[in-house]
Amino acid sequence: MAEIHADEPTRRDFLYVATGAFAAVGAATAVWPLIDQMNPDASVLALASIELDIGAVPVGQEITIKWRGKPVFVRHRSEEEIKAAEAVDISTLRDPQTDDARLMKGPNGELEKQWLILVGICTHLGCIPLAYKGEFNGYLCPCHGSVYDTSGRIRKGPAPLNLEVPPYKFVSDTKVQIG
Amino acid sequence: MSGHSTYKPTNGFTKWIDSRLPIIRLAHDTAVSYPTPRNLNYWWTFGGILTLCLGIQIITGIVLAMHYIPQTDLAFNSVEHIMRDVNYGWLLRYTHSNGASMFFIAVYVHMFRGLYYGSYKAPREILWILGVLIYLLMMATAFFGYVLPWGQMSFWGATVITNLFSAIPLVGKSVSTWLWGGYAIGDPTLNRFFSLHYLFPFLIAGVVILHIWALHVTGQNNPTGVEPKGDKDTVPFTPFATAKDAFGMSLFLILFAYFVFFNPLGLGDVANSEIANPLKTPAHIVPEWYLLPFYAILRAVPDKLGGVLLMFSAIAVLFVLPWLDTSKVRSARFRPLYKQFFWLHLIVCIGLGWCGAQTPDMVITHVGSIDFTVTYLARILSSYYFIHFIILFPLLGLIEKPKPLPESISASVLGAAKA
């Protein structure tokens, strides 16, 4: 073969490239199960949704429950907390979002403004923020000092995003389904 | 491993072996006849000490794995079981947990020795890069291992570190979920970390073989930084380096034994004596001492992605060090300016470590009406860390007037003897 000096690619060149490409695709296919086995398995996904009675949480208090292995904050907000959250000029926020956009509608079709439900994980590096702490009396992350307001929005510190709102819906006035 | 072999098989059996698998020849050329510069000081014994550390970690680790259970409900108790019930379990575990710290003490001495004497410079670039690779693998291994006892700091340290990857744009969150095997750190995470903690030391051993191979191709650097010019400048590895290494190891083992027997928890964090609680973050999260400088750099940046990138850059910059240094002289002995900046850099690294251990908003002093916090200090020190490598390394080689180099190693040694 060394003595063939064709300017045009030969049929043999084509076969080499085609064989190599086919082998590469085959190798990638074989590797995929080895990578994907690390993703959440069926038993983890099966625990993806829970139902919860929130009627017993008094105004001005908060409970923490576990959903998908993560803490979820259910906060019964007071009038002042709701007002403070609504009064914020959203153009000053790092992750602009209105308070309303972070709430869900109840069974009667109106926003349940007193219920704030959040994934209790700081969007910086995953610590659990402390409730009713920090400058805005919302949340303060003890690890690197991120400060969130009474809507769980990031106001100060290194975290880039607001506390995540999990997917949830009101099944009745006092029951929510998370997930 | 390279150069002309001086091994001569002495009897029929070794001749028979030598013509089939010349493994005795390899051992002889590597560890007996290999010529080492005759002026090596005790800072050069840390290569051997590190090999010893790796051996201790692998041996104690293998036996600990016979008793440990990588399951979130049982892991913490299985470690307590090792400490209380298993014969000599306390000794094995304290040796292993303090062994990690000893390993890092030795690797930092080894690396700063390389920086001082210019051991990363041509023709030892690949040798240095392999070393940085080993250092990276060591940090990963130590991180996986720290998670296994499933204490509060294990869990939250793992949470913070795995969340670093969530800073990657677009795919970050999927990467974190993939690393966890769930939506938070849990059983799948603990299991895979155990598997990888067992695997990585053998990867390290593999790269160590390449590291030693590269070392034996280029030969060792030495305190003068002048290459050996002949037999007068070298001595055979055995008995000279072997004996010196053994003495260095003995001294190092005294320090090791002090921690294992008299202060076994001194280098760890007390929060890890509490079982992991996924619903409660400890008030103050800190990594193990050997990662503190990088943690300080991470926290010095007020932006998540920026902090993560800068932290990884602090290690990445080491890979290109051989090409950043423009000086033709290797050893800081003959580089009056670099010598001063070397010590400054060492102090800065220790200072960063101190910053990493404090709460970021702790006020150190007041400058006028401004509170000078740990974060500000960490920003200044982090800046110097990068200025040192990216600006001073190229610059010093151009503006510095080095002292005259000795003609050869033997001339330098004999000159010193006369003086």
Image: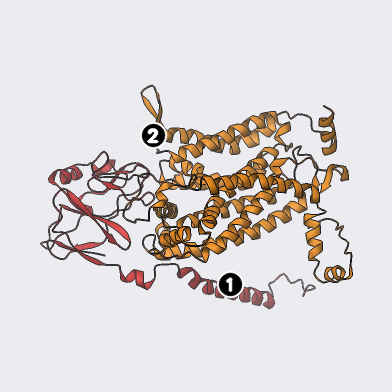
Chain colours: A red, B orange
Q: Quadrant of the C terminus of chain B?
A: top right
Looking at the rendered image, the disc whose residue lies closer to the viewer, 2 or 1, is 2
Q: Is residue B132 above or below residue A135?
A: below
Q: Residue B389's image quarter?
A: top right
Residue A40 position by quadrant = bottom left
Indicate the amino acid at tag 2: Met
Vertical order, B122 against A174 (above or below): above
Q: Residue at x 27, y 57 (%)?
A: A72
The residue singled out by tag 2 in the image is B362
Amino acid at dot 1 = Ala
Q: Residues within 10 Å of mark 2 (few under 14, many from 20)?
A: few
Q: Secondary structure at mark 2?
A: loop
Name the residue at 59% across, 32% down: B344
Q: Position of residue B408 (x, y in %)?
A: 84, 37
- Identify residue for label 1: A24
Asked which quadrant contains residue A107, the reply is bottom left
Q: Which quarter of the rendering shows the N terminus of chain B?
A: bottom right
Would residue B320 be visible to someone looking at this image? no
User: Tag 2, which chain?
Assistant: B
Above or below: residue B384 compared with residue B2: above
Q: Nearer the viewer, residue B26 or B367?
A: B26
